[in-house]
Amino acid sequence: MERYYRPSDGSSRAYHVVETYEPGWAERNVDDVRSVLRRCASYLVLGSQVSFDIVDPQYLDGAGLLIRGRIEHADIPNTVTYFVMLRRGETVSTVSLPDPGGQAAVDSIAARVVARLG
């Protein structure tokens, strides 16, 4: 399932994907993301530096990952996006949030995602 959320203030929209896997594959998905982030933490694209760092590898008491992505541009302001990845059983929920103004806002949104996953 995919959804987009557009804030009423007109700021950038958030993107939410919920995936359900066959037994054992949700954990593999999360492990694959961790592996890619270790190998490809930073790279150059069209003159901009793209980087990812795991802010909290045990986010929400071990239920997920909190990842910060950055795009550093030479001639325009940098872009920051947070990714909240949560796993419950064989379901993985990933929310992509343009910087909402700090981790407190990210935590609030993540808490709502956890509540929906049960």
Image: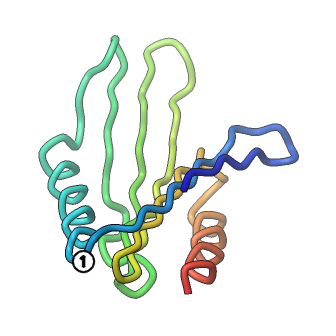
35 left or right of 112? Answer: left
| Quarter containing the C terminus | bottom right
> 10 Å neighbourhood of mark 1: few (<14), some, or many (≥20)?
few
Foreground of the two, 113 or 61: 113
36 left or right of 109? Answer: left
State the colouring used for the structure image: rainbow
Which residue is pictured at 49% across the width and 62% down the height?
18
Foreground of the two, 15 or 65: 15
Q: Disc 1 designates what residue?
A: 23
Q: Helix, strand, or loop for circle 1?
A: loop
Foreground of the two, 37 or 18: 18
With respect to residue 21, does 94 lie above or below?
A: above
| Quarter containing the N terminus | bottom right
Which residue is pictured at 37% across the width and 63% down the height?
55
The percent coordinates of residue 37 (x first, y second) are 22, 50
Which residue is pictured at 42% across the width and 52% down the height?
68
